[in-house]
Amino acid sequence: MALAPLMVGAIQGRTLGEKEALALVNGSPAASALVADCVLAMRRRLDLAEQLFALSIEAFNAPLEAYDAAFAELWGDPDEAASLAALRRWLEGAGGVRRPYQAPVSYRILPRLLGQFRRALAAAETVAATALRAVTDNPVFLPPDAAYPAGRVCSNGGYHNAAATPAMEGLAACCAELCLIADRHVSKLLDGRTSLLPDQLADGDGYLGNLGMVQVGYVEAARRAAQRNFLPGSEGGGFGQNDVAPASFPAWRSQAEAGACLEATLTNLAIVASQALQVTGRPPPPALAPLLAEIRRLFPPLSRQRALADDAARLCDAFRARIFAPAEA
């Protein structure tokens, strides 16, 4: 059903051989495309998340000991080691006197949560690579061999990609968890008793406390989107042959919604982290300077009270454009 609208125009006016029309619309290329699309977007979301969480670490002035290179060997996990290394790259050159005591849990567990995202992404990449080269047509023609000189035509379930749905659900869950971490970072940065920064990051008449309220809605929306998608029935609950439908399209929508929520929560975190550095007169680590400049171009730091929605939307749109930019960009 997903492929038929795409193929109708291609086959009109053409003379097709036996089963050629069905071959164009059967199989599981739609599921293969969905999980591949998910992987491409999530790669860039992960990169953006690592940069913005590194910016938050610096804005909070968190002790850097939680990101010591020694943990790569101690934890023994290649994905967590890769995220630890990424945070260290973005934080290289971070300076100044750090907080005299440990940061909240939401800061210290970042390498492990980002590593889990990498692990889920690697699993989805494997699913996509396998699906893109798989033969999933139904029925499928098997070439002649010694046992079947004329070949065989076999009905099968190749059109059902059972791995695509859980792969996309795994990434949706990772997005939901990072939404929560972004919410916690915003709350901690805004709370002067915890952050040791100006309370609510007020500078003049500026105030960002409402962004902490906004985060809650995105966290809950991401959690709902990340719920498991079960196999849907079809045709009145089982009449005829097509009695089970795939869950790949609902799963793709789930990860897309959770990913959009992550973009929104990261946008709010970017705004608050930028303001924290602004009101304390601190520069970012050199590797994050271009990102901070882009944030401030689209959402200038507050020096007086103003409406935030339009600037925040522009920044969120810019992050989304980065995620879905053509590969050459």
Image (cartoon, helix red, strand yellow):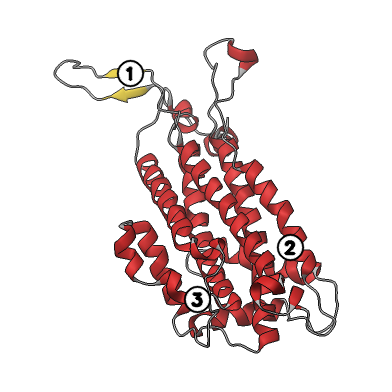
> In the displayed image of the protein, which residue is found farthest to the front?
101
User: Mark 2 sits on what residue?
Assistant: 212
Nearest the eye: 201 or 240: 201
Labels 2 and 3: the sequence-earlier one:
3
Q: Position of residue 246 (x, y in %)?
A: 53, 28
Query: How many marks can you see?
Result: 3
User: Mark 3 sits on what residue?
Assistant: 63
Res. 196 in view: yes
Residue at figure coordinates x 61%, y 49% from the top left: 258
Horizontally, residue 155 falls left or right of residue 61, namely: left
Labels 1 and 3: the sequence-earlier one:
3
Residue type at numbered disc 3? Pro
Q: Secondary structure at mark 1?
A: strand
Residue type at numbered disc 1? Val
Residue at figure coordinates x 56%, y 10% from the top left: 240
Q: Position of residue 305 (x, y in %)?
A: 86, 78
Horizontally, residue 214 falls left or right of residue 263, namely: right
Nearest the eye: 235 or 268: 268
Mark 3: few, some, or many residues within 10 Å (few <14, many ≥20)?
some
For marks 1 and 2, give the CA distance. Answer: 60 Å
Res. 9 in view: no
Q: Is residue 226 above or below residue 210?
A: above
Q: Secondary structure at mark 3?
A: loop
User: Mark 1 sits on what residue?
Assistant: 153
Residue type at numbered disc 2? Gly
Q: Position of residue 65 (x, y in %)?
A: 43, 74
Q: Secondary structure at mark 2?
A: helix
